[in-house]
Image: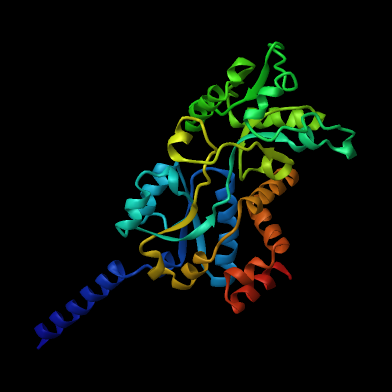
Amino acid sequence: MNKIIYVFMTLIMALALVAGCGGPDKSAAKTIILSDAGWDSVKFHNAVVSYIADKAYGLKTKVVSGSTPITHTALVRGDIDVNLETWSDNIASYKNDVAGGYIVELGVNFDDNKQGLYVPRYVIEGDAARGIAPMAPDLKTVADLKKYSKLFVDEENPSKGRIYGAIPGWSVDEILFKKFNHYGLNEQYNYFRPGSDATLNASIMAAYAKGEPIVAYNWQPTWLTGKLDLVLLEDAPYNEKGFLEGETAFPSVRVTVTANKNLPKKAPEFTDFLKKYHTSSALTAEALAYIAENKASYDEAAVHFLKEHNELLDQWLPADKAKSVRSALGN
């Protein structure tokens, strides 16, 4: 009899040990792991979604940082739950990963992003408030730049104009340089490669502050394009073959909200919210400009953004969840 009791008690203890060691970690199940590939826009979106996760769903979030290849591999593997800014065209395995069921495309965050050659609006239209007359009223396209090399003069070589190109090592730099040659701009301009995006932006900011002409590569969304009134020069309609040769406009990229295959089971209601999480390049740039102008943190910018664009809560959330977030915001 004692032997039977001993075996029974041993079995109970063993089952308790297994349950304690091998059962689901409930606290871990309530923590959503977000991807951060390093750029400002995804940090901002992570802050917005983290705020809603907390105030509407009682979920904690954690951010894992790394390069795009590293974070995407982690997303596929399940070490990351969601990427709020998956630049789908820039990830070679993206379509196969979705088709294979390793990741789930929940929706599109924004798909109105742009890049190319920009000029300040005052160059074309002038700015009466600043006492700036139009400098190039007929400037509309990249090809039109051939008529204005003396306007965008290169101070280091005044016989030619200067076009501020992309950053050395970026794939876009090769395409942009092909465009530079395709339109024959090499005959009248120097193609200047800034050493970094910070140097590029500083050059644009300096010219803008003085009301001087400048033509430079940039992209949206960034704090710069959110802060300054810039005009993207038109180009030939996009086609893949022509684009690779520098003959057409840059395409917009579908920036998707992508989750590991297990997230819908881990947090189904939160996943439903992410399916509706849609912003725009313009809204993102506006938020980044707020951060730059006010030296705000990403968390502070998220709260400001949700207060300023309160209507988005009704698009993203059920009524009771939207009410919870508004209550937290003090609205």
- Kindly identify the residue that appears in the image at 69 percent across and 47 percent down: 291
Given residues 70 and 182, the one toward you in this image is: 182
The location of residue 176, given as percent across then percent down, is: 54, 29
The location of residue 149, given as percent across then percent down, is: 70, 20
How many numbered badges does the structure rendering display?
Answer: 0
Q: Is residue 17 above or below residue 199?
A: below
The location of residue 20, given as percent across then percent down, is: 31, 70
**In which quadrant is the N terminus drawn?**
bottom left
Given residues 157 and 142, the one toward you in this image is: 142
Q: Is residue 84 visible?
A: no
Q: Is residue 273 visible?
A: yes
**In which quadrant is the C terminus drawn?**
bottom right
The location of residue 131, given as percent across then percent down, is: 90, 33
Quarter occupied by residue 283: bottom right
Q: Is residue 155 above or below residue 85?
A: above
Q: Is residue 126 above or below residue 169?
A: below
Classify residue 9 as left or right of residue 172: left
Instruction: Please name the colour scheme applied to the rendered image.
Output: rainbow
Residue with the most extreme bottom position? 1
Given residues 200 and 236, the one toward you in this image is: 236
Given residues 172 and 260, the one toward you in this image is: 172
Q: Is residue 93 above or below residue 200?
A: below
